[in-house]
Image (tube, grey):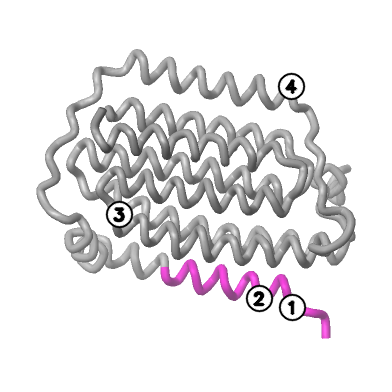
Amino acid sequence: MTLEAAGFWVVAAVLLASSLAVVLTPNLFHAVLYLAAALVATGVVFLLLDSPFLFAVQLLLYAVGVMTIVVFAIMLTERLVGERITQTSRDLLNGAVVATGVFVGIAGFLIRASPSPPRPPLVADTTPALGRALVGPFAVTFELLALLLVVALLGALYFARTDE
Amino acid sequence: MSLTAYLTLAALVFAIGLFGVLTRRNAIGILLGIELMLNAVNINLVAFARFHGDLLGLVFTLFTIAITVAEVALGLAIVIVIFRVRRTVEADRLDLLRG
């Protein structure tokens, strides 16, 4: 077994276990911590796919940024040290049936699809090419993204303001 | 590992996230499930980019990550406003618009 295959199985186990914990644990705060683990595991999957830059983005934006916002929101709405931190689930059976159905559908498509191409050898580090693409052919999209982030920030500020 | 292995892993994570969205009562819990589903899609994009030797998937993943972060920030702002008004974040009890 190659190093990549071993890493894949370990990361896949961690990712699936923490994902299941996110949707099953009754404690909302623990669910967020498990989500952080799942996001870091996803970052490691990016690393296995030779994308170190996306791994860094995943860590910085998701695992740190999103975690901070979500914990902040839980503290505001549930009073972190106190009651009401537990959450209940409903329609577990229906949810399981629908989720399994979706997975079976995707898996059926994967089985019928043509055999996957062999992994091409890595030509070069993708990060410089990624940077050139962002300021070259995708410059307008990149700027639109900046605009979207500003608008989202303003919208969040507008929502969260106090009435005075 | 083959492309199919990565796609299967992503499909499993997507199904788990969907399960969370369908079963959670808390609005923040539902948002966490949506996060899982978006992550699964990102795994797909990066895997396709790697196995086809195409940079486009990576560029697209960068964009989806940034958009997701904006979406989470806005979604949580909405949750906080809802909590201020209704004193609850239970999705079932947010039925203000029900006729």
Residue marked by disc 3: B59
Residue marked by disc 4: A93
Badge 1 density bin: few <14, some 14–19, many ≥20, Cα 10 Å: few
Q: Which mark is residue A90?
A: none
Distance, label 3 to label 2, CA atoms, is 29 Å
Q: Residue at x 43, y 31 (%)?
A: B9
Q: Residue at x 83, y 42 (%)?
A: B92
Q: In the rendered structure, the residue with mark 2 lies on which chain?
A: A
All told, the count of numbered labels is 4
Badge 3 density bin: few <14, some 14–19, many ≥20, Cα 10 Å: many
**Residue at the bottom extreme, as displayed:** A164
Secondary structure beneath label 2: helix
Q: In the rendered structure, the residue with mark 1 lies on which chain?
A: A
Amino acid, disc 4? Leu
Q: In the rendered structure, the residue with mark 4 lies on which chain?
A: A
Badge 4 density bin: few <14, some 14–19, many ≥20, Cα 10 Å: few
Secondary structure beneath label 4: helix
Contact? badges 4 and 1 (CB < 8 Å) = no
Looking at the picture, do discs 2 and 1 lie on one chain?
A: yes
Residue marked by disc 1: A161
Distance, label 1 to label 3, CA atoms, is 34 Å
Residue marked by disc 2: A157
